[in-house]
Image: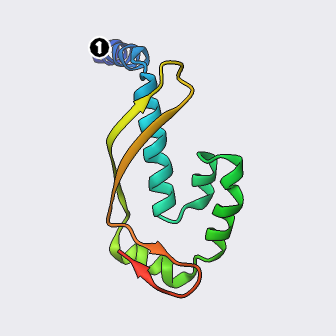
């Protein structure tokens, strides 16, 4: 009998979760968060998945400048945290603007080893 209740409960939860659809605004905000988390945590391979073709070479350049010391610093400091401050989508769903706040981030300057925190 417990297995039957567990099965019914599982089906109900699955049904409820699968019925929830993200709005375009929520999807765009999540995409911005995914990109920023990947970018500011030096995961440029994932960041490329969310970027435009014209920015691919820039991300490759940045990735080639990440050294072991940078990765150790990132591990010591912890991951960057991203939150959405505001977002707008045009009526045709063709353009969007998302403003994110990045906390605990640092930026590598490929020329020289100056760090911004």
> What color scheme is it?
rainbow
* Helix, strand or loop for disc 1: helix
Answer with left or right where residue 36 lies relative to residue 4. right
Residue drawn at (66%, 74%) of the image: 64
Number of numbered callouts drawn: 1
**Which quadrant is home to the C terminus?**
bottom left
Answer with left or right where residue 30 lies relative to residue 109. left
Q: Is residue 6 above or below residue 25?
A: above
Residue drawn at (44%, 55%) of the image: 37
Q: Position of residue 48 (x, y in %)?
A: 63, 52
Q: In this view, does 2 lie above or below 60?
A: above
Question: Label 1, on which residue?
Answer: 5
- Residue 106 lies in quadrant: bottom left
Q: Where is residue 20 in the image (x, y as percent from the top left)?
A: 39, 18
Q: Where is residue 2 in the image (x, y as percent from the top left)?
A: 28, 17
Residue drawn at (32%, 19%) of the image: 6
Answer with left or right where residue 82 lies relative to residue 32. left
Residue drawn at (53%, 31%) of the image: 95
Answer with left or right where residue 110 lies relative to residue 38. right
Task: Check the image and name the residue furthest to the bottom.
Answer: 112
- Residue 55 lies in quadrant: bottom right
**Which quadrant is home to the N terminus?**
top left
Q: Is residue 56 above or below residue 110?
A: above
Q: Where is residue 28 in the image (x, y as percent from the top left)?
A: 47, 34
For label 1, the crowd category at 10 Å Cα-Cα, with few meaning under 14, some 14 to 19 and many 20 or more, is few
């Amino acid at each position: 009998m417990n297995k039957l209740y567990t099965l019914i409960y599982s089906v109900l939860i699955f049904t409820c979760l699968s019925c929830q659809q993200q709005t375009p605004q929520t999807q765009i905000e999540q995409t911005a968060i995914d990109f920023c988390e990947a970018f500011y945590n030096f995961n440029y391979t994932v960041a490329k998945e969310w970027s435009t073709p014209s920015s691919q070479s820039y991300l490759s350049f940045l990735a080639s400048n990440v050294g072991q010391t940078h990765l150790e610093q990132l591990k010591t400091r912890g991951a960057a945290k991203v939150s959405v401050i505001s977002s707008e989508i045009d009526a045709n769903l063709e353009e969007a603007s998302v403003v994110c706040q990045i906390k605990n981030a640092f930026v590598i300057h490929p020329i020289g080893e100056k760090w911004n925190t």
